[in-house]
Amino acid sequence: MGRYSKNSRNIRTLNTVQQLKDATFGHRFPRHGLKLLHWLANDMIKFDNIWTILCHPDNRGFGFHIFHNSEGILPPLTGSSRYFEVGNLHAPGAQSLPFREDQSWNMESNTDRIILRLDSNMMIGSVYITEHTPNNSRFSAKDTYRLSNKLIRSIKGESLENFLRKAGYDPGESVQNHRASNESYSITIEEESSDTSSHNEDNETYGLLDEHSKSSNRRTFTGKADPRDDSNCCCIIL
């Protein structure tokens, strides 16, 4: 069975929903951490004397991927144990998460992460919650906690509505108000040449070339405000 070293910073363990309520993890819309935790406890974790995960994170379902702990926020691993992260809404497979459509794409909406320590038999050794800070693309050590088996067991079987209420979730502004800031916009760019051969990037990250404008010097792009991704952080997606 995989092992891990405890020779690292002291990570506080949360044992009750009340203690979880005192953390900032996922507590206000559009953050998603509490919804992510409820989904994990009820749909992904099985308890039969031991805790096991019901999917194989190596397959990257639901956005699971290896967490390399490059910033040292968690204890270093030994043996065959590995850390897996879930919660990055930009990760491949994350579109299968049940709450993704409720999210508003702003600086806060992709903050919360859950990290599992798994051994080679997919047995769960530890569950951690943490926050990815978008301003500096790093994880917050002070907002990293270990969740006890007792806490996870108390969440399992609880309805989402009751759990969010007990954990102090604040829905904040409505989804509709947040969506207004994410609406498509159009810009028009005058070009000196009608030659489109050197503008392949126009169809990529920030907008799509208007089909009606390809033959003229005037191009119209339709796109969305670019959300801050954490692709450069230490949660490397292999």
Image (cartoon, rainbow, N blue to C red):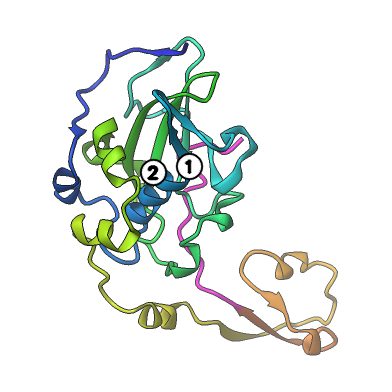
Q: Is residue 144 visible?
A: yes
Between 231 and 38, the one lying in front of the other is 38
Between 28 and 200, the one lying in front of the other is 28
Cβ atoms under marks 1 and 2 closer than 8 Å? yes
Q: Is residue 225 magenta?
A: yes
Magenta stretch: give its range. 223-238
Between 59 and 151, the one lying in front of the other is 151
Q: Amino acid at mark 1?
A: Met
Residue 41's label in the rendered image is 2
Residue behind mark 1: 44
Coordinates of residue 49 in the picture (x, y in percent): 39, 23
Name the residue at 57% across, 58% down: 95
Query: In what quadrant of the picture does the C terminus appear?
Result: top right
Q: Amino acid at mark 2?
A: Ala
Q: Is residue 211 above or below residue 149?
A: below
Q: Quadrant of residue 108?
A: bottom left
Coordinates of residue 40 in the picture (x, y in percent): 42, 45
Name the residue at 23% across, 22% down: 9
Q: Secondary structure at mark 2?
A: helix
What distance separates the C-alpha of mark 1 from that of mark 2? 6 Å
Residue 182 is left or right of residue 140, and the answer is right
Name the residue at 50% across, 43% down: 232
Q: Is residue 230 above or below residue 124?
A: below
